[in-house]
């Protein structure tokens, strides 16, 4: 299974938001945001789209698949 990397914590902190504020804004628990940020949980498409929509950016600027390091690509 491919690992999904994300920039949720980075984007959230750039905007001065707490995990709870982001969670409230998109209708999930703070624990959900925490587990997404630490990559213990991969969000559903709906949650990923809500996060990207809240930040007003394309979903692929927040979430990406791990690059193949064996081919010399850096992890995103």
Image (cartoon, rainbow, N blue to C red):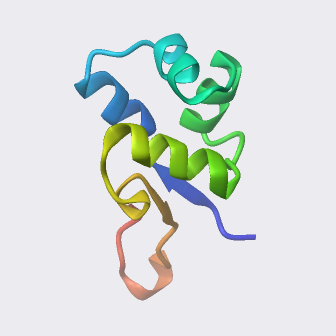
Residue 7 image-quadrant placement: top left
Residue at image point 54% right, 12% down: 20
Q: Is residue 58 above or below residue 6?
A: below
Residue at image point 56% right, 50% down: 48
Q: Position of residue 37 (x, y in %)?
A: 54, 34
Q: Position of residue 54 (x, y in %)?
A: 40, 37
Q: Is residue 53 left or right of residue 11?
A: right
Q: Is residue 21 left or right of residue 72?
A: right
Quarter holding the N terminus is bottom right
Outermost residue to the left: 14
Residue 8 image-quadrant placement: top left
Outermost residue to the bottom: 71
Q: Is residue 11 above or below residue 25?
A: below
Q: Position of residue 65 (x, y in %)?
A: 53, 68
Residue at image point 41% right, 46% down: 53
Residue 18 image-quadrant placement: top left
Residue 62 shows in this picture = yes
Q: Position of residue 25 (x, y in %)?
A: 50, 23
Residue at image point 50% right, 17% down: 19
Q: Is residue 50 left or right of residue 8?
A: right
Residue 7 shows in this picture = no
Frontmost residue, 4 versus 21: 21
Q: Is residue 27 above or below residue 56?
A: above
């Amino acid at each position: 299974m491919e690992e999904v990397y994300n920039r949720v914590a980075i984007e959230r902190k750039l905007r001065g938001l707490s995990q709870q504020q982001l969670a409230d804004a998109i209708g999930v628990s703070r624990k959900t945001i925490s587990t997404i940020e630490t990559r213990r949980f991969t969000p559903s498409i709906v949650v990923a789209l809500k996060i990207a929509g809240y930040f007003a950016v394309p979903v692929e600027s927040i979430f990406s698949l791990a690059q193949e390091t064996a081919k010399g690509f850096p992890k995103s």
